[in-house]
Image (cartoon, rainbow, N blue to C red):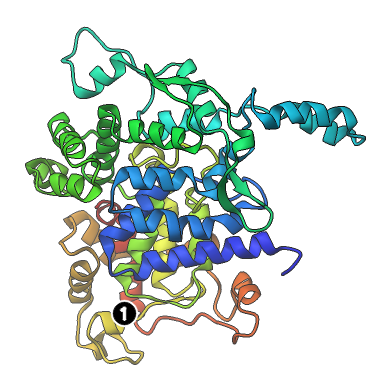
């Protein structure tokens, strides 16, 4: 454990997040926490320090601000050691700062070649400044087109940022660093590293004022009409449609500006809009792998004693938690997640889940169907296969499936080949312990999987959870 502590901490972080998603009774908060963790993406494997910084990032930075003011969230992420480490701002030093001048002098006396080079290479890092503008606030730089109506975003693009703006923002944020990153990992402002002098960002002069310069720029970005449009568009894509109606986005953006970036107000505007309730967008969104896995476990009512196999399943489905290496985060659109291979993998996961072949996750279909809690045949249960299937449709999907899906479920729910193929991809064979769970829970009794009490219901449930209807929300 001591030798592999980053791996251990990382696994516990992923398990905690998975358990919160599965068991949360505050769904909007959980969804918005997930949204902002993706928007302000941090990669778990950036280095050995990130696993130790990410628990506080989720707990103290993202979750408390998930439904608050966007500016508060933006400032909290900017000061977060996890973000400072991920996008390298903690190492950024103003070219004319005291630290830069002293670094050059110290390099002359350094005997170790690596230390000498490191002291020489210290300087301005623009990574965070660039992503702050492009991914966190204003959006990608764009050009105003003459053949389309001028929107709020177009007006903002007309005074869009340049590379010079990125450099100036990077200088403003010099000195925003981490105190003893290998130990406490707390944010602090270091005046020695801060670039002196006046800066100009988006045409506005930022007077020399130390840490307050950064707060002024963050306020400017958080209250920009372009930011309102950018954030509103992402929210509409997440909740409504891959191509949200422009009128809805404009309404949300106006609410963003009028409320000072109050996230609850923007969401309420979206929920109260006719476009949100339009039949054209009802269940039109394809679930991401994370949404699919979490919703399948929640719908099944399964008991999760270890979530490790669940986040391992997400890796196989192409969406590991904190696993996006680039800062843009995962896509909320269907394109990256819809192809024949992905859908087969989802079906295999669903069948493994329903047949209790995922270690640490146990279903109880007899309870879900309102049957006595003992192994029984369909005749003993007093329900025909068709009756069970209809009941499972209502419990798992909340609506009827298509005739084609129902016919497929009734024809194949006893097919052992489907279960065997699923088990090869995701399942743990009967009487085989889940290995990583034993590493993290070394004193606990060995967990073993068992056959479901109602095999018929398990077979049907797996096919329904893997059906096209369940892939949409």
Mark 1 surroundings within 10 Å by alpha-carbon count, few (fewer than 14), some (14 through 19), many (20 or more):
many
Q: Residue furthest top?
A: 146
From the top left corner, tell me how far across and down residue 240 is, in percent.
Answer: 21, 43
Q: In which quarter of the image is residue 86?
A: top right
Residue nearer the viewer, 457 or 235: 235
* In front of the other: 240 or 352: 240
Above or below 469: residue 433 = below
Relative to 154, say whether 301 is above or below.
below
Badge 1 element:
helix
- Relative placement, left or right, of 215 versus 153 is right
Q: Position of residue 103 (x, y in %)?
A: 76, 30
Which quarter of the picture shows residue 1?
Answer: bottom right
| Residue under the image location 41 percent in, 37 percent down | 215
Look at 26% across and 51% down and name the residue there.
Answer: 472
> Residue 63's spot in the image, x, y percent?
38, 58
Question: Against 293, is 468 above or below?
Answer: above
Q: Position of residue 228 (x, y in %)?
A: 26, 34
Q: Relative to 218, is 72 above or below?
A: below
Q: Mark 1 points at which residue?
A: 365
Which residue lies at the image location 45% right of the left edge and 32% below the top edge? 213
* Residue displayed at 60% across by 47% down: 178
- Res. 160 visible in picture: yes
* Residue 417, visible in the rendered structure: no
């Amino acid at each position: 454990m001591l030798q592999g502590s980053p791996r251990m901490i990382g696994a516990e972080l992923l398990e905690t997040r998975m358990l919160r998603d599965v068991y949360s009774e505050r769904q909007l908060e959980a969804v918005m926490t997930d949204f902002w963790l993706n928007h302000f993406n941090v990669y778990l494997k950036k280095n050995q320090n990130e696993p130790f910084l990410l628990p506080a990032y989720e707990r103290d930075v993202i979750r408390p601000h998930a439904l608050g003011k966007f500016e508060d969230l933006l400032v909290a992420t900017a000061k977060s050691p996890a973000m400072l480490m991920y996008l390298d701002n903690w190492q950024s030093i103003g070219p004319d700062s005291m630290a830069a001048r002293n670094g050059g002098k110290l390099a002359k006396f350094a005997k170790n070649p690596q230390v000498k080079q490191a002291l020489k290479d210290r300087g301005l890092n623009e990574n965070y400044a660039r992503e702050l503008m492009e991914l966190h606030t204003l959006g990608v730089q764009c050009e105003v087109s003459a053949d389309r109506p001028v929107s709020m975003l177009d007006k903002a693009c007309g005074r869009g940022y340049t590379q010079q703006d990125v450099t100036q923002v990077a200088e403003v944020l010099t000195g925003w660093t981490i105190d003893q990153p290998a130990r406490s990992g707390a944010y602090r402002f270091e005046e020695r590293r801060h670039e002196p002098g006046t800066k100009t960002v988006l045409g506005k002069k930022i007077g020399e004022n130390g840490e307050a310069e950064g707060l002024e720029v963050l306020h400017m970005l958080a209250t920009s009409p372009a930011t309102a449009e950018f954030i509103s568009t992402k929210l509409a894509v997440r909740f409504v449609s891959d191509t949200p109606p422009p009128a809805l986005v404009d309404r949300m953006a106006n609410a963003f500006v009028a409320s000072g970036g109050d996230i609850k107000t923007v969401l309420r505007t979206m929920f109260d809009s006719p476009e949100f309730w339009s039949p054209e967008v009802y269940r039109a969104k394809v679930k991401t792998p994370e949404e699919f896995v979490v919703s399948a476990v929640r719908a099944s009512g399964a008991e999760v004693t270890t979530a490790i196999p669940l986040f391992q399943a997400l890796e196989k489905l192409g969406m590991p938690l904190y696993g996006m290496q680039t800062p843009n985060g995962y896509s909320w659109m269907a394109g990256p997640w819809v192809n024949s291979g992905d859908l087969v993998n989802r079906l295999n996961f669903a069948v493994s889940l329903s047949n209790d072949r995922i270690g640490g996750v146990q279903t109880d279909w007899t309870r879900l169907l309102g049957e006595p809690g003992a192994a029984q045949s369909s005749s003993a249960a007093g329900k025909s296969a068709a009756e069970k299937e209809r009941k499972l449709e209502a419990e798992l999907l909340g609506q009827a499936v298509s005739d084609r899906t129902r016919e497929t479920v009734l024809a194949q729910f006893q097919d052992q080949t489907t279960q065997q193929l699923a088990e090869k991809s995701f399942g743990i064979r009967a009487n085989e312990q889940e290995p990583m769970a034993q590493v993290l829970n070394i004193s606990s009794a060995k967990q073993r999987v068992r056959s479901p009490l109602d095999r018929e219901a398990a077979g049907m449930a797996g096919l329904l959870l893997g059906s096209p209807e369940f892939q949409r929300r």
